[in-house]
Image (spheres, grey):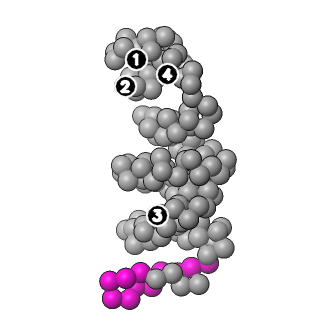
Amino acid sequence: MVRFFCPGCWEDFPADFEICPNCGMDTRAFWTDKDYMDRLVVALDHPVKSTAGRAAWILGKLGSAKAVTPLISLIKKTKDIYLIRSAVRALGEIGTEEAIQFLFSLSDCRAQTIRDEIQLAMELNGLGIGVQTTSDEKEIVM
């Protein structure tokens, strides 16, 4: 069964509405000025985690630097390890300096699966790196 979600309150409904019955948002007007990339960025907050994960995956494949900040925000606010992994992979595929620096800041993450994904992202960007800790400072080792 198809469900429709309001992008304002993320309430789901069995039918599509122009005006959300829950929060009053004009959903048609909201989507009118959004291009494909903007719609994917909005989908990063979707309550169905598989939808958010697919949006992250597509954003990574598109490689748009416009997606870096929203992907970083997603990683910072979610506790879902699979969603974090998708966003980390997307940042690695985008490969901007901001994305790589953020991924490097996560290199001491407790979750091995995330550290593995970060390592793959670094290798993808030609940074076959390891992380060394010297005193309180991290250094990239090439």
Residue sitting nearer the eye, 132 or 64: 64
Q: Earlier in the sequence, mark 2 or mark 1?
A: 2
Which label lies toward us, 4 or 2? 4
User: Residue at image x 55%, y 71%?
Assistant: 119
Q: Amino acid at mark 1?
A: Met
Q: Which residue is mark 4?
A: 30
Q: Measure how far apart labels 1 and 3 are at the Cα level.
A: 34 Å
Q: Position of residue 58 (x, y in %)?
A: 63, 44
Q: Earlier in the sequence, mark 3 or mark 4?
A: 4
Residue at the front extreme?
33
Which numbered dot is residue 102? Answer: 3
Marks 3 and 2: which is nearer the front? Answer: 3
| Residues at marks 2 and 1, CA–CA distance in whole angstroms | 8 Å
> At which x and y percent is residue 36?
63, 33
- On whether residue 137 falls in the magenta region, the answer is yes
Tell me the SS state at disc 4: helix
Residue, disc 2 = 9
Quadrant, the C terminus: bottom right
Q: Secondary structure at mark 1?
A: loop
Closer to the chain start, of discs 1 and 4, is 1
Cα distance between the residues tagged 4 and 2: 12 Å
- In this rendering, the answer to whether 115 lies above or below 23 is below
- Pointer 3 or 2: first along the chain: 2
| Quadrant for the N terminus in the image | top right
Do residues under tags 2 and 1 come within 8 Å of each other at their CB atoms? yes
Q: 10 Å neighbourhood of mark 4: few (<14), some, or many (≥20)? A: few
Q: Is residue 79 visible?
A: yes
Please report the bounds of the magenta region as a residue range: 128-138
Q: Say if mark 3 contacts mark 2, CB within 8 Å.
A: no
The label shown at residue 25 is: 1
Q: Position of residue 16 (x, y in %)?
A: 51, 12
